[in-house]
Image: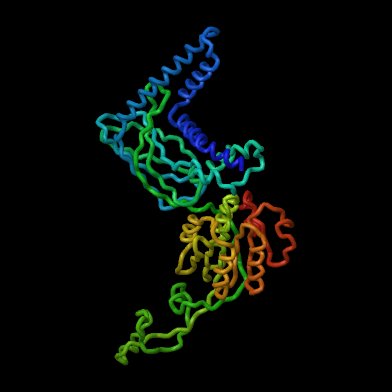
Amino acid sequence: MAGALLRAALFPALRRLEHWRHFLRERLTPAGRFVLATGFAAAVFGIDTRLNQLYQLFTLALILLLVSGLAALIGGWRLRSCLDASRALPSTACVDIPLDYPVELRSRHRRTLEGLALTEQLPDPRPTRAQFRDPNQAAAAGDTWLDRRLGYPRWQRLLARNRWAAQPAPKALEPISPRGRLRVGLRLIPKRRGYLRLRGFWLTRPDPLGLTRVRVPILQEQSLLVLPKRYPAPMLSLPGHRRYQPGGWRLAATVGESQEFIGLREYRAGDSPRLIHWPSWARTDEPVVKEYQDEYFTRHALVLDTFADTSSHDGFEAAVSIAASLCDRIGDGESLLDLLFVGPEPYCLTGGRGLAGTAQFLEVLACAKPCETQPFERLQQALLGRIGQLSALVCVLLDFDQPRRELAWTLGSLGVPTRLLVVSDQPMEVLLGGWTGAQVQRIRPARIAEDLARL
């Protein structure tokens, strides 16, 4: 309790500290940071003006920074609204894969613009108060007693988690002629999945003394969907047989399956025009439709466990990456695949021939979030409601506790072939704890590629 109160009191100070760190990193050049450090040292060691003359060095550093800052302020006013910018982003990107894209700049200025640099405005990664005070944020193994009380290592971990992309270095620009155009390439390396919302650009230029940077915003809002990180995985050949699929001829026609023609009948309101038998209509002068027998398909399911709290963030992200890696490695081209998980409500996306493809699966997984408000039994209910249609399942679980074991037992008792992939760092003997049901395969978050290769 005392630690939580202390962290709540320190939260504003940590936000201000991060703001100043960002200011020193982005607004001061390396030379400017050196002058600032020199002035600070001179102020500390020259506080007694009777013992040394270091106060003069402090005064000189202060004057240089003030003059440089004033020049940057004037330069920023003169640069404001001198450029328009537009970027050509692809529809999607992928975590940890560099994204290169062009940006076109158009000058409004009557003189040549020189010495400029351009960089993206990335979302603010500073944690919110709710994130910082969340009691489920687990301490790291190396945190000391003081670290757990003050919360600074937690602050640093949340900063890294909230950072959407690696901070790119400013892109130096060639001189831009009056009313001219310039096309440059920028690079981003996304670090989080989901919708990355870019507000615009920062246009920077060092002041004449080279100590501070002029920094002017160029607004250009745009969004980009970042897909989960994927790893190489082998094809999974699952056992199981074809199951009856409610949905009639429409589902069969959509997935390209042949159907057995069983006869003709009179047209009924609501029948699709695709079923009309034109020769019979011409012969009888009455609309006649073809009637088919319901089909049977091979249908697999990829089940993602979303029941995680904030303390298991890394495990949940690993589970999403595993599901993304397997969404095109299950079954064959003739089968259907259901992606099933629980968000605010149970969600199921069906893919296969003629239906959703890998791209749609990845877009859905990019927006998947942990489910913290509903019990795990909600997943079991959603899965059992579809179990009669499924030939086999692959379950990506975040743990192997009692509720998840009960789900595995239920699936085994129904005779549905199931592969259980558990995201965990625990030793196998601890993880299984006497389990004798379906085979459980452990996927370690730090070695996903290595463990997936063994499937």
Display colour scheme:
rainbow
Q: Quadrant of the N terminus?
A: top right
Q: Is residue 249 left or right of residue 74?
A: right
Q: Residue furthest bottom?
A: 284
Point out residue 177 in the picture as x, y percentages from the top left corner.
28, 32
Point out residue 185 in the picture as x, y percentages from the top left corner.
40, 41
Q: Residue at x 54, y 8 (%)?
A: 52
Q: Nearer the viewer, residue 404 or 278?
A: 404
Tell me where residue 394 sits by quadrant.
bottom right
Q: Is residue 219 left or right of residue 389?
A: left
Tell me: residue 274, above or below residue 418: below
Q: Is residue 262 left or right of residue 268?
A: right
Q: How many marks?
A: 0
Q: Residue at x 36, y 23 (%)?
A: 70
Q: Quadrant of the C terminus?
A: bottom right
Q: Nearer the viewer, residue 45 or 226?
A: 45
Tell me: residue 111, above or below residue 93: above
Tell me: residue 178, above or below residue 366: above
Q: Residue at x 39, y 48 (%)?
A: 89
Q: Residue furthest top?
A: 50
Point out residue 146 in the picture as x, y percentages from the top left corner.
64, 36
Q: Nearer the viewer, residue 173 or 71?
A: 71
Point out residue 172 in the picture as x, y percentages from the top left corner.
40, 33
